Image: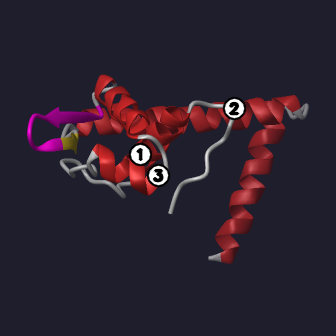
């Protein structure tokens, strides 16, 4: 089934984000082989050139490595994966804070709202 993409951002970057989030959540494990460019293109419903660009960007970020004749593999470097997780966490926090500030919510109120929200969610479990 083909993925749905936002028209406002390059498709290859959306696929990069999807794969990096899967790696950060350990849905894709260190050392795992990614699908071939052709397989990923078919699964995503995009042109193989888009996937080639995706894999190139992931390799530039040192998140994957291509082994000639074998395929593309997720890095086994725990340091790189931990850096990726930390970066994604910071990006999400920055987005949250920016959105709250746009609503006119101050730091103290953000903390209070977050504590209330987490307490309510704790009660649901």
How many neighbours does mark 3 have within 10 angstroms: few (below 14), some (14-19), or many (20 or more)?
some
Residue farthest along the left direction in this orientation: 69
Q: Nearer the viewer, residue 45 or 23?
A: 45
Q: Nearer the viewer, residue 104 or 67?
A: 67
**Mark sitting on residue 8:** 2
Picture quadrant where residue 94 is located: top right
Name which residue lies at 38% across and 29% down.
53
Q: Which residue is mark 3?
A: 44
The percent coordinates of residue 78 (x first, y second) are: 24, 40
Picture quadrant where residue 84 is located: top left
- Taking 123 as reference, is 34 above or below it? above
Lateral position of residue 45 relative to residue 113, left or right: left
Q: Nearer the viewer, residue 50 or 91?
A: 50
If you read the primary sequence from the N terminus, does the residue marked by circle 1 or circle 2 appear first?
2
Lateral position of residue 9 relative to residue 49, left or right: right
The percent coordinates of residue 110 (x first, y second) are: 78, 40
If you read the primary sequence from the N terminus, does the residue marked by circle 1 or circle 3 appear first?
1
Name which residue lies at 41% across and 45% down.
19
Query: Is 68 a magenta residue?
Result: yes
Lateral position of residue 71 relative to residue 5, left or right: left
Q: Secondary structure under badge 3? A: helix
Q: CA distance from mark 1 to mark 3?
A: 12 Å
Name which residue lies at 72% across and 53% down.
115
Magenta residues, as a range? 63-71
Query: Is 66 a magenta residue?
Result: yes
How many neighbours does mark 1 have within 10 angstroms: few (below 14), some (14-19), or many (20 or more)?
many
If you read the primary sequence from the N terminus, does the residue marked by circle 3 or circle 2 appear first?
2
Name which residue lies at 68% across and 76% down.
124
């Amino acid at each position: 089934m083909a993925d749905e993409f936002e028209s406002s951002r390059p498709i290859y970057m959306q696929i990069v984000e999807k794969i990096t989030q899967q790696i950060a959540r350990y849905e894709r494990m260190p050392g795992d082989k990614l699908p071939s460019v052709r397989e990923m293109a078919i699964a995503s419903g995009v042109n193989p050139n888009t996937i080639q660009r995706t894999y190139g960007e992931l390799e530039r970020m040192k998140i994957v490595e291509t082994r000639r004749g074998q395929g593309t593999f997720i890095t086994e470097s725990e340091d790189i994966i931990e850096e990726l997780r930390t970066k994604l966490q910071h990006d999400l926090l920055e987005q949250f804070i920016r959105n709250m500030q746009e609503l006119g919510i101050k730091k103290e109120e953000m903390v209070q709202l977050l504590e209330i929200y987490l307490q309510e969610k704790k009660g649901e479990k």
